[in-house]
Amino acid sequence: MTDRAVRNLDHLRRSASTARVLNLLRVWERHGDSRDDGGARTAEWAERPMFRSQALNRSLIIKHRLRRNEFDLFTGRRQVATKVVVPIDEADLKTGGRYVFVNQIGFERSITEAFGLQPDHPDIETLRLIDKLPSLDPFLLREQLRRSGQDPADCYFSISDGDLLQMTEFVRRQIEPLVTLSLDDDTVAVASESAARMTAKILSNAPGNQLDALRETLRLAPEQYEEGVFCWKGFLYYKWSLSRVMGDVATVAEAVRTVQPAGKLDQPSREYLTRSREVLRARIIRTCDEVARTLRIYDDAYENLTVHGRPTAFRDFLLDAPAMFSRLGDQLGAIQHIVSYWHFRFAPGAAQVQVEELIDIFMDFETSLLGRDEFAETSSFLAA
């Protein structure tokens, strides 16, 4: 692991989980550490672990945008991989860590050599479920694991009761127009109560007559409908997330233009930062616009179903949703990560950022926002 990677790992250790990073080491320090120096052990952490392997349950899991020299690690072309990093010394991440990419060539052999896990170990299936997600948003991560019958303790997911209530209310408002279609008495009270029940079923993956009726109306096979509804749920979550993060995005985009590092700037560093400020700000804004356009595809399909009575449009959306969901999650996950990490690293009272670290941060942010066509070109620039 390079010196730059070690520095980044040390920063990640101190930050909370984000849409791009699942910091299980910090979860262990907060809920599983029973040392005498302040660690408070949480019973659920031990009773309902995310991973059975102690090493994996204290790891950092990262949605990592692959570099050019990492493409050959996989049989198919992909831009983002799930990287599992296990620290060599949990108390000092500057010593580095062992890492493996989920589903890389020889993954099962690598996981056996690194962690002693056999190919049929349940933790390997958990890693593969996580790899299928485009981002590590806690709500979607929890839902993905629950779909497969896994139920890790709440401490593994940074979802507050307040956030869960807000998300539930947001989904209820979104669902209400659909519910009114099936009601003879469409009074506000009846529609609201029925929407609340349907929202609970959707968010809990519980079966119900309304959900079965919608599947029959849309003429979808059970497996198509199950996957489509999960992605529909993801679109609703992303709509809610985007509405919450937009104000912070504007603040961070402006801060990128003005932040100044501590220490002396040499000419190459000055040139890179000058260029990167405008490029990064433009990419943040462009990515938000692309996310909004994708979400409008859902809005249009849902309006066709609930307002114009055209279920075919919503059926097509559910069939296309898995492909769009992956791209959308990658883009919004990058935005959420940038906002979360910026607030962590530039919080009041935080140590001033040095030149090399600011370059690292800008490189990380810029790479995370790259489109497929831009990636190879920019990789060459960053490696120069």
Image (cartoon, rainbow, N blue to C red):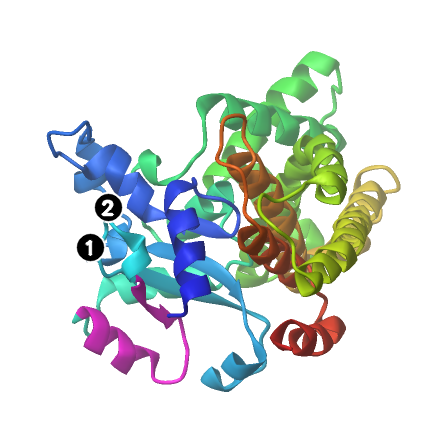
Instruction: State the residue position of label 1.
Output: 52
Instruction: State the residue position of label 2.
Output: 49
Nearest the viewer among 110 and 108 is 110
**Label 2 SS:** loop
Residue at the image point whose x is 18% and y is 37% from the top: 33
Q: Give the range drawn in magenta.
A: 96-115
Nearest the viewer among 46 and 178 is 46
Marks 1,2: beta carbons within 8 A: yes
**Label 2: few (<14), some (14–19) or many (≥20) C-alpha neighbours in 10 Å:** some
| Residue extending farthest right | 308
Mark 2 is on which residue type? Pro
Nearest the viewer among 338 and 95 is 95
**Residue 362 sits in quarter:** bottom right
Q: Position of residue 66 (x, y in %)?
A: 54, 72
Q: Where is residue 92 in the image (x, y as percent from the top left)?
A: 26, 51
Circle count: 2
Q: Can residue 51 be seen in the rendering of this structure? A: yes
**Label 1 SS:** loop
Q: Where is residue 281 in the image (x, y as percent from the top left)?
A: 77, 49
* Quarter placement of the N terminus: bottom left
